[in-house]
Image (cartoon, rainbow, N blue to C red):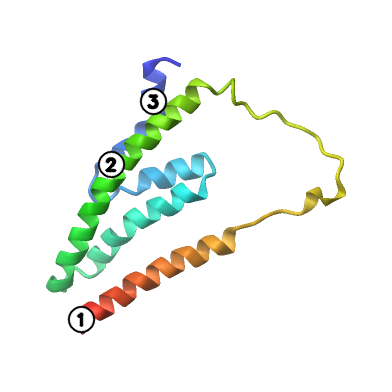
Amino acid sequence: MNAFEKIKRSWWVIFSVLIVLNGLGFIYIGFLHKNKNWVIEGIIYEIPWLFGIILSDFDPILDVYVAISMVLLLVSIVRSVWVAIKLADVYDNEDKYAIQSTQLNNSNVNKENNDFPTTIACCSCLILIFIAYAILAFM
């Protein structure tokens, strides 16, 4: 794969540099590669910005959310560049690591492993932690 193709497939890294949109790149690439961990990581990068916007009228707590958001912004920049480099290696070796379809003759194949409730529980827990933090900051 040439350099232009690698850059074309890594355009999502631009979102990590944008202040309020730094998690959207991970959400996009997570949905594209069906990787729930990247989607959750993108949501985690976005949560402090959303709370900062919602709580913009409360000056004492806004400073804390801006500090957390700026740290997560730096982490998301480093992490997105790292993931883009690793994905470039994967794209270079696509033919080598291509998944071959196989047909199974097993009656237990129709059982599906669905981790969707786990994802909801994880996101709900993170939101509750931020709400609890906001309540404690006002006390």
Separation of marks 3 and 1 at Cα, in angstroms: 46 Å
Q: Secondary structure at mark 3?
A: helix
The correct choice, above or below, for 129 with respect to 67 in the image is below
For the point 58% across and 64% down, the residue is 117
Separation of marks 2 and 1 at Cα, in angstroms: 31 Å
**Label 3 sits on residue:** 8
Say what amino acid the circle numbered 1 marks: Phe
Say what amino acid the circle numbered 3 marks: Lys
**Label 2 sits on residue:** 77
The answer to whether 2 appears left or right of 106 in the picture is left
For the C terminus, give its image quadrant.
bottom left
* Dot 3 or dot 1, earlier in sequence: 3
Where on the picture, by quarter, is residue 55? bottom left
Residue 79 image point, x, y percent: 34, 42
The correct choice, above or below, for 2 with respect to 73 in the image is above
Q: How many marks?
A: 3
Mark 2 closeness class: few <14, some 14–19, many ≥20 residues within 10 Å: some
Residue 25 image point, x, y percent: 37, 43
Q: What label does residue 138 carry, if any?
A: 1
